[in-house]
Amino acid sequence: MENRAPVRLGILISGRGSNLQSIIDAIERRELSAEIKIVISNRPGAAGLARAEAKGIPVRTIDHRRYQSREDFDRALIQALRAHEVELVACAGFMRILSPLMIEAFPNRIMNIHPSLLPAFPGLNAQQSALDHGARFAGCSVFFVTAGTDDGPIIAQAVVPVMPGDDEASLSERILDQEHRIYPYAISLFQQGRLVVEGRRVIILDAPRLKDLNAMLNPPLRS
Ligand code: GRF
């Protein structure tokens, strides 16, 4: 694979920013060739802003409550992202639905991460929904954002088992560990020019193969 320039990222957050941190860390470890041009929060004082500031990354707060409509808010987002010459937008715990305006401004250039094995459990409280449903497996998905909620072409997923005695906190933590692995990886595939969107599917060029065609069973057949 040819050497490409670092991808210019804009990261959108609303809160804690642990996925943002995983992206920062992957860049520092040189596992991801990227430059974070700007981190934007729609919530003033979001903890993730401090993580970015600590690394000297430019931050902005664009408070959605100060805009009349979703479109006006998105226009402000687009302007800030363009001003920083962002190529790829990564939503990382960003709790706003994007309007078609934003999606058309960055077609197949907006990623998001969701704490479920999509298309199961889109929307809020995905981990609790998996527990309530009695699922034996849960996980997380990185996908390209489209108009529907958590509905876009899936780039990468990680599966975790639901364990006896799990509650929302324990399951969320197990899933979050995997989010921190697959999000930087999905971005690196983009940076390498290896993601081709064909309808609902994302083709990964030169995709690594699963070593063994292992099924995962939960519970295992014998204990
Ligand atoms: C993560 O679980 C992510 O999947 C979801 O919101 C949470 C954000 O966590 N979209 P953080 O702000 O990245 O720590």
Image: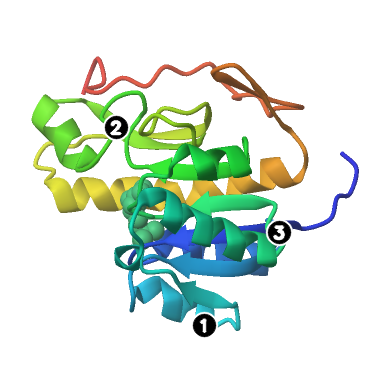
Q: Is residue 29 visible?
A: no
If you read the primary sequence from the N terminus, does the residue marked by circle 1 or circle 2 appear first? Answer: 1
In the picture of the structure, the residue carrying the numbered disc 3 is: 8
Give the side of residue 204 with respect to residue 160, left or right: right
If you read the primary sequence from the N terminus, does the residue marked by circle 2 or circle 3 appear first? Answer: 3
SS at circle 1: helix
Residue 93's x, y, as percent? 37, 55
Out of 210 and 198, give the one closest to the viewer.
198
The disc at residue 53 is 1
Give the side of residue 55 with respect to residue 179, left or right: right
Instruction: Tell me how far mark 2 sits from mark 3, CA to CA.
Output: 28 Å
Mark 2 surroundings within 10 Å by alpha-carbon count, few (fewer than 14), some (14 through 19), many (20 or more) = some
Query: As shown in the figure, which amino acid type bears the numbered disc 1?
Result: Glu
Rendered residue at 22%/22% (across/down)? 219
Give the side of residue 129 with respect to residue 78, left or right: left
Q: Are discs 2 and 3 less than 8 Å apart at CB? A: no
Mark 1 surroundings within 10 Å by alpha-carbon count, few (fewer than 14), some (14 through 19), many (20 or more) = few
Q: Is residue 67 visible?
A: yes
Out of 68 and 197, give the one closest to the viewer.
68
Query: As shown in the figure, which amino acid type bears the numbered disc 3?
Result: Arg
Rendered residue at 71%/59% (across/down)? 8
Query: As shown in the figure, which amino acid type bears the numbered disc 2?
Result: Pro
If you read the primary sequence from the N terminus, does the residue marked by circle 3 or circle 1 appear first? Answer: 3
Instruction: Tell me how far mark 3 sits from mark 1, CA to CA.
Output: 17 Å
Residue 139's x, y, as percent? 34, 36
Quadrant of the frame with the N terminus: top right
In the picture of the structure, the residue carrying the numbered disc 2 is: 122
Rendered residue at 68%/58% (across/down)? 86
